[in-house]
Amino acid sequence: MVIKVFLASSSGSTAIKKKQQDVVAFLEALKVDYTPLDIACNEDNRMWMRQNVPEDKKPANGIPLPPQIFNEESYCGDYDTFFNAKEDNLVYTFLGLPPPPGSKEAEQADKDNIVENGTHAEENLDDTIVPVEDRNGDSNKEVKQATDENEEGEGDEEEKEGAAKEETADDEGETVGDEAPTEKEEEAAVEETDEEGQAEEEEEQEEEELRQLEEQDEQGRAVVSGGGRGRRRRRRRVGRNTGGRG
């Protein structure tokens, strides 16, 4: 790309000379390659300049004055627009050139995410990056939907398993609670059985003692009865003996 600067080397206007000097000096300071084209000594240059300046950029009389700046055949602007770009650190943008790395304009371009054509990098990324769903069609959407459904199903199953475990724990707790009174009841039944056994043994002992007492009474009566009979027999014998003697 060639920067063209249309100048008037033999201009009698001091203001035009000063403006031309400012533009050339600044371009040289930036080390921007440019080609000066004199319209005072070259009629072709003057006619080309007048024909390629846009109508809305021409002054009221229709004759543009130097300096006029072009990038190849593309119109950049006149001195006033160049000066405004200089004040805003946008000279490279004004010239249609990429700013060199490390320059103020490059730093500002990085901050503003501005590329060569003045659009934002984010917009370019949005234009170039295609969503995965759009590239691969609806198949990825279906796979993603199926994956989401599977994850939801697994989540529901885990919740159900957790609820079942809690119910089982509650049932076990209730069972343990129910078994505790059963053990107490068994202990009470055992105690009652022992007491009943002891009572039966005591009754048997009492019956045995009563039986022994009855046997003793019967034996005593038999002894008494036997003694009476002996005395009677003795009396009879004595009587007999006495009667015989008399």
Image: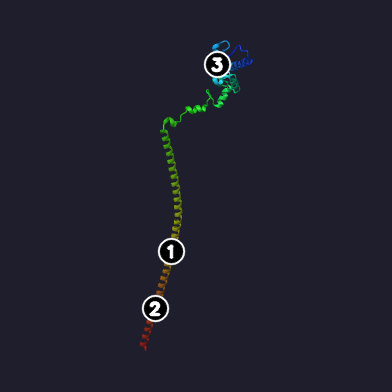
Callout 1: 10 Å neighbours few (<14), some, many (20+)?
A: few
Of residues 225 and 195, the one nearer the viewer is 195
Q: Nearer the viewer, residue 237 or 130?
A: 130
Label 1 sits on what residue type?
A: Glu
Residue 50 tag number = 3
Residue 211 rendering spot, x and y as whole percentages: 41, 70
Q: Which residue is mark 1?
A: 196
Q: Tag 1's secondary structure?
A: helix
Instruction: Kindly report which numbered mark, 2 or 3, lies closer to the viewer in this rendering.
Output: 3
Residue sitting at the far front: 61
Q: Secondary structure at mark 3?
A: helix
Q: Nearer the viewer, mark 1 or mark 3?
A: 3
Q: How many marks overall?
A: 3
Residue in front for this viewpoint, 190 or 229 = 190
Whole-angstrom CA distance, mark 2 to mark 3, is: 179 Å
- Residue 85's image quarter? top right
**Which label number is shown at residue 225?**
2
Q: Quadrant of the C terminus?
A: bottom left
Q: Is residue 87 above or below residue 221?
A: above
Residue found 45% across the figure and 54% down from its top: 178
Residue 212 tag number:
none
